[in-house]
C-alpha cells in the first residue's frame, strides 16, 4: 500500500490538531505509536527486544521516506493501526482511516449524509 504520511490530522471543526505547536501529521502519530511501550492488544507483557527493534525500524522508515510517501505491506499497516490505540479516539480513528486510504470527510459523509 502506498501511504502519504504528510497528511494532517484535524479536529471535528476542521482545524489541524496541534502537537507541540505544529500541525500533527500521520507521520507523527504513527512514529509516536511505534515508539511507545504499548503492546498489541492481543498480547500481554512488555514488547520483546526484537519487537522494539522492528518498531524502531518502521518509525525510521516512515520518518525518512522521500516526500513522506511510503510503500508498506498490509501486515505492517495493520501492525501500526493496532499500536495507534495509545491515542484518543480522534487521533487514533483518523490515523487508522488515513492508513486505509480514507479521510475524516469520507467518514462525516458516511455518517452525516448516510444517516448512520
Image (cartoon, rainbow, N blue to C red):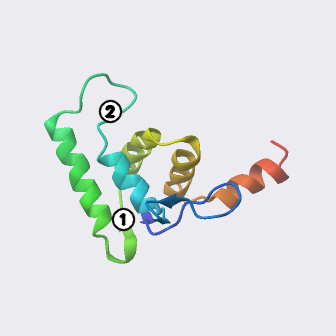
Quarter holding the N terminus? bottom left
Determine whether, in the image, residue 112 is placed left or right of residue 13: right
Q: Nearer the viewer, mark 2 or mark 1?
A: 2
Residue occupying the point 31% across, 42% down: 36
Q: Residue 71 carries which label?
A: 1
Q: Could you tell me residue 80's position as x and y percent?
A: 38, 47
Q: Residues within 10 Å of mark 2 (few under 14, many from 20)?
A: many
Residue occupying the point 81% across, 50% down: 112
Q: Depth check: give the residue in front, 97 or 20.
A: 20
The CA distance from mark 2 to mark 1 is: 24 Å
Q: Could you tell me residue 20's position as x and y percent?
A: 43, 60
Tell me, yes or no, if residue 75 can be seen here.
Answer: no
Q: Depth check: give the residue in front, 32 or 81.
A: 32
Residue occupying the point 33% across, 24% down: 43
Q: How crowded is mark 1: few (under 14 residues within 10 Å), some or many (20 or more)?
A: few
Quarter holding the C terminus? top right
Determine whether, in the image, residue 2 is placed left or right of residue 60: right
Numbered label tally: 2
Residue occupying the point 18% across, 33% down: 48
Q: Could you tell me residue 99's position as x and y percent?
A: 49, 55
Q: Depth check: give the residue in front, 80 or 21.
A: 21
Q: What element carries label 1?
A: strand
Q: Could you tell me residue 44's position as x and y percent?
A: 31, 22
Determine whether, in the image, residue 57 is placed left or right of residue 90: left
Tell me, yes or no, if residue 4 can be seen here.
Answer: yes
List the residue tagged with mark 2.
39
Amino acid at each position: 500500500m502506498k501511504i502519504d504520511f504528510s497528511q494532517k490530522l484535524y479536529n471535528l471543526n476542521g482545524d489541524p490538531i496541534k502537537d507541540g505547536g505544529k500541525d500533527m501529521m500521520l507521520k507523527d502519530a504513527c512514529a509516536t505509536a511505534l515508539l511507545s511501550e504499548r503492546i498489541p492488544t492481543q498480547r500481554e507483557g512488555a514488547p520483546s527486544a526484537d519487537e522494539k527493534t522492528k518498531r524502531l525500524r518502521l518509525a525510521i522508515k516512515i520518518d525518512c521516506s522521500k516526500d513522506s510517501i511510503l510503500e508498506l505491506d498490509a501486515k505492517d499497516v495493520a501492525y501500526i493501526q493496532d499500536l495507534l490505540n495509545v491515542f484518543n479516539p480522534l487521533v487514533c480513528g483518523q490515523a487508522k482511516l488515513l492508513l486505509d486510504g480514507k479521510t475524516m470527510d469520507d467518514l462525516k459523509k458516511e455518517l452525516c449524509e448516510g444517516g448512520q
